[in-house]
Image (tube, rainbow, N blue to C red):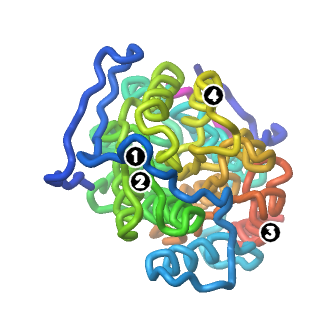
């Protein structure tokens, strides 16, 4: 599907997992009709084990926990809960030229991490005077690749992509570069900025996925006072950003001697609606109350999990409670605000990232180096859910980013 947006349009809103002797790989084949791969702890909590303490919050605090691992987690929680009121991004860069034709490919139109960035990009493009064509990536690797080849055939001035797997797309990125078309990504890889592993991608705009995952796990450690027993769910090797977040969450949980990762569930991102309900239900029924927290790489998993858990008797106050390592969807903000299962999401400034993508494209068009700017994520909890765009279901920092980019670009 292709959509054209003229500049006058009003803007709408390789980490490898370590194989440990204490872990056994289990593939769920027939149970609940699933085909998900899971990693299960060999000494999972026995029936009747007391549930991990669940405070229902991981808000910032000036108190210093006695457990060093919890104290370290609390420090990260405090940092990621702070308001963002000061611009710490670039202050210089090339001026923009109106009339450029840009193709933006949204990997999954059901994913706020894509559509929120696209909305910001359209705002920026309208301010600059660029023409934008959107192509739907159809929420699959094959659909992404087809959309990217379609975009190259349109011979635009530049291409923006969101939530692509750079390993699968590198040949097409190389083809675009050979045609003189720079490509800038959002959530396209496991590191922000330029990555020499993918030399044909001009820049990747994202908060650091490892940091996002660490904040997510630290929220669980703080809320449980270091005793969290968790499951982790993501899309595994389908995209490197998935495996990066999963591995980082697991590593961070295991910094506490009294916390435990019970299971890691992996299945394709496009299968969330068909698989997550069964996966969440199976975990809940297997572990019962010892399962204090469910962690996932994205809020979308909880959209599918919650109705299924309610159907088998789980209560909104938990256990389990839910935390997401991205991206800060409106549904997640509502759940957090209402105290419905989800206690936190680690949100990125999606609209701001759209403006940064425009800036990185402009730098590429002018043969300038990427800005190197990396935003720090926001831990959204019930205590701060309505701040800085939260009332509208998003994290939109009060740091004046629109005016800052306009100043760099030389526009009013």
Observer-side mark, 3 or 1, equals 1
Q: Is residue 181 above or below residue 376?
A: above
Observer-side mark, 3 or 4, equals 4
Instruction: Estimate the spatial distance between the alpha carbons at disc 3 and disc 1, rounded to whole Å.
Output: 29 Å
Quarter of the image containing the C terminus? Answer: bottom right
> What mark, if any, has residue 245 been given in the picture?
2
Instruction: Estimate the spatial distance between the alpha carbons at disc 4 and disc 1, rounded to whole Å.
Output: 30 Å
The residue pinned by badge 4 equals: 313
The residue pinned by badge 3 equals: 398
Q: What secondary structure is the stretch in magenta mostly built from?
A: strand
Instruction: Estimate the spatial distance between the alpha carbons at disc 3 and disc 4, rounded to whole Å.
Output: 41 Å
The residue pinned by badge 1 equals: 242
Q: Earlier in the sequence, mark 3 or mark 4?
A: 4
Q: Residue at x 78, y 57 (%)?
A: 385
Decide if residue 207 is in sight here: no
Observer-side mark, 2 or 4, equals 4
> In the image, which residues are magenta?
131-138
């Amino acid at each position: 599907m292709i959509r054209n947006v003229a500049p006058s349009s009003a803007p709408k809103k390789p980490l490898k997992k370590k194989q440990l002797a204490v872990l056994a790989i289990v593939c769920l084949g027939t149970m609940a009709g699933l085909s998900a791969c899971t990693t299960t702890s060999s000494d999972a909590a026995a029936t009747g084990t007391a549930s991990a303490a669940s405070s229902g919050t991981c808000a910032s605090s000036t108190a210093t926990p006695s457990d060093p691992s919890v104290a370290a987690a609390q420090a990260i929680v405090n940092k990621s809960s702070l308001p963002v009121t000061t611009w710490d991004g670039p202050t210089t860069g090339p001026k923009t030229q109106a009339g450029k034709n840009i193709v933006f490919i949204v990997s999954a139109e059901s994913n706020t991490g894509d559509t929120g960035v696209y909305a910001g990009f359209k705002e920026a493009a309208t301010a600059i005077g660029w023409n934008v064509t959107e192509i739907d990536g159809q929420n699959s690797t094959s659909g992404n690749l087809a959309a990217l080849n379609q975009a190259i055939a349109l011979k635009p001035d530049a291409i923006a992509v969101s939530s692509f797997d750079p390993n699968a797309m590198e040949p097409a990125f190389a083809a675009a570069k050979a045609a003189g078309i720079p490509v800038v990504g959002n959530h396209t890889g496991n590191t922000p900025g330029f990555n020499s592993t993918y030399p044909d991608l001009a820049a990747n705009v994202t908060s650091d996925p490892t940091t996002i995952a660490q904040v997510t796990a630290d929220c669980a450690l703080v809320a449980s006072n270091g005793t969290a027993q968790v499951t982790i769910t993501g899309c595994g090797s389908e995209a490197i950003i998935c495996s990066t977040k999963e591995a980082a969450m697991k590593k961070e949980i295991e910094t506490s001697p009294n916390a435990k990762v019970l299971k890691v569930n992996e299945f394709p991102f496009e299968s969330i609606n068909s698989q997550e309900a069964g996966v969440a239900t199976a975990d809940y029924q297997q572990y019962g109350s010892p399962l204090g927290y469910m962690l996932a790489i994205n809020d979308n998993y909880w959209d599918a999990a919650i109705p299924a858990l309610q159907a088998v008797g789980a209560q909104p106050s938990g256990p389990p409670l839910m935390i997401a390592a991205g991206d800060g969807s409106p549904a997640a903000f509502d759940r957090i605000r209402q105290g419905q299962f989800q206690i936190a999401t680690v949100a990125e400034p999606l609209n701001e990232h759209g403006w940064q993508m425009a800036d990185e494209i402009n730098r590429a068009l002018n043969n300038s180096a990427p800005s190197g700017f990396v935003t720090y994520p926001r831990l959204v909890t019930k205590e701060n859910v309505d701040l800085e765009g939260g009332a509208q279901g998003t994290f939109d920092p009060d740091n004046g980013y629109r005016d800052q980019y306009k100043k760099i670009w030389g526009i009013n």
